[in-house]
Amino acid sequence: MKLVELKERIQNIIIDIDGAVAVLTMNRPKALNALNGDTLGEIVTIMDCIAQDDSIQGVIITAEGKGFIAGADISEFAPLDTMGGRLRAELGQKACTAIEKLEKPVIAAVNGYALGGGNEVAMACDIRIASTKAVFGQPEVNLGIMPCFGGTQRLTRLVGYGIAKELIFTARQVKADEALSIGLVNKVVEPEELLPAAKEMMATILSKAPKAIAMCKVAINRGKEMDLDDALELERDVTGLLFSTADAKEGIAAFMEKRPAVFTGK
Ligand code: COA
């Protein structure tokens, strides 16, 4: 199914298609876009659809107002028992992993509160651009629970053990400038510049060979879970695959002929 056909079936996320870019705007403003079960399921459905839709080459995830995503929807937590809590964690992890494993670039354009599951969604994206109004944090210990949509793992991999433990243990909220200084975000811009900056960066990425970007994402994401020898072997293997693509032949020929490359995604 094409993403355009999915639009009407999705309740909590607005899907805009801007050329080859899907702009996903979280849309539960009354709860600051807190992730209820339905919204997590919708993220999985959208990512599955985009994976199959050749007309979509990149994704931007954003929201409007003071909330990017204020975490998992706490109003659904009270009835959860042991298995219920585990299943909710599994669903949240599934949504974040669907974003991370999509073999197309995903940029989070973080406009406001990115707390708990919101920070976890942002961290599952490839690149994070924050507005000066963005706020990040993992406040779960305030509730007697813990980050469970991948936060204990992805935050640690992004900012290191010490800072990850400090932020998770204290539940301290971090503003955009500090998020930049610890490597949690790539760039900070004024609120009105947020979407334009995300679109500009995406346009730069999409001007490159799509399969090369996809294989870079695979090598970086899978490689960080491997020892160096295995990761380097993966790097060699996916490099070999790229050499057989039409875009690699075109890119190399264009360089030799001193002309701009015209990539087709093949
Ligand atoms: N789950 C469910 N509802 C949430 C929510 C969440 N994670 N975060 C915010 N909301 C709801 C609030 O209950 C409130 O609803 P109401 O207007 O019906 O009372 C609405 O969103 C606005 O939030 P409010 O707390 O009034 O806004 P604020 O500007 O005073 O505070 C936050 C903003 C983000 C600091 C605060 O809402 C908050 O701490 N949220 C929870 C964050 C969290 O712990 N996330 C991790 C969950 S595991």
Image (spheres, rainbow, N blue to C red):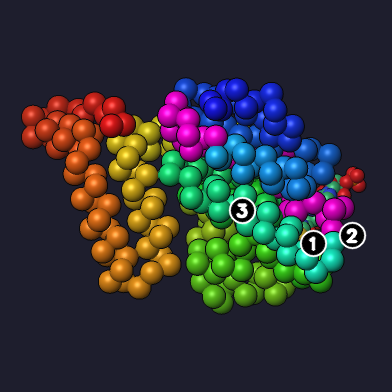
Q: Nearer the viewer, residue 144 or 92?
A: 92
In contact (CB < 8 Å): disc 2 and disc 1: yes
The residue tagged 2 is 79
Q: Residue, x 39% and y 50% (percent of image)?
A: 217
Q: State the CA–CA distance, disc 2 to disc 1.
A: 8 Å
Disc 1 marks a residue whose amino acid type is Gly
Q: Give whichever of discs 2 and 1 has the lower sequence position.
A: 2
* Label placed on residue 139: none
Residue 23 in the image: x percent, y percent? Answer: 57, 32
Respond yes or no on whether mark 1 lies under 8 Å from ligand 1.
no
Q: Give whichever of discs 3 and 1 has the lower sequence position.
A: 1
Membership of 240 in magenta stretch? no
Q: Is residue 199 visible?
A: no
Residue 38 in the image: x percent, y percent? Answer: 75, 43
Residue 12 in the image: x percent, y percent? Answer: 73, 35
Q: Is residue 51 visible?
A: yes
The residue tagged 1 is 84
Q: Which residues are magenta?
A: 49-77
Q: Nearer the viewer, residue 251 or 249?
A: 249
* Label placed on residue 94: 3
- Image-quadrant location for residue 109: top right
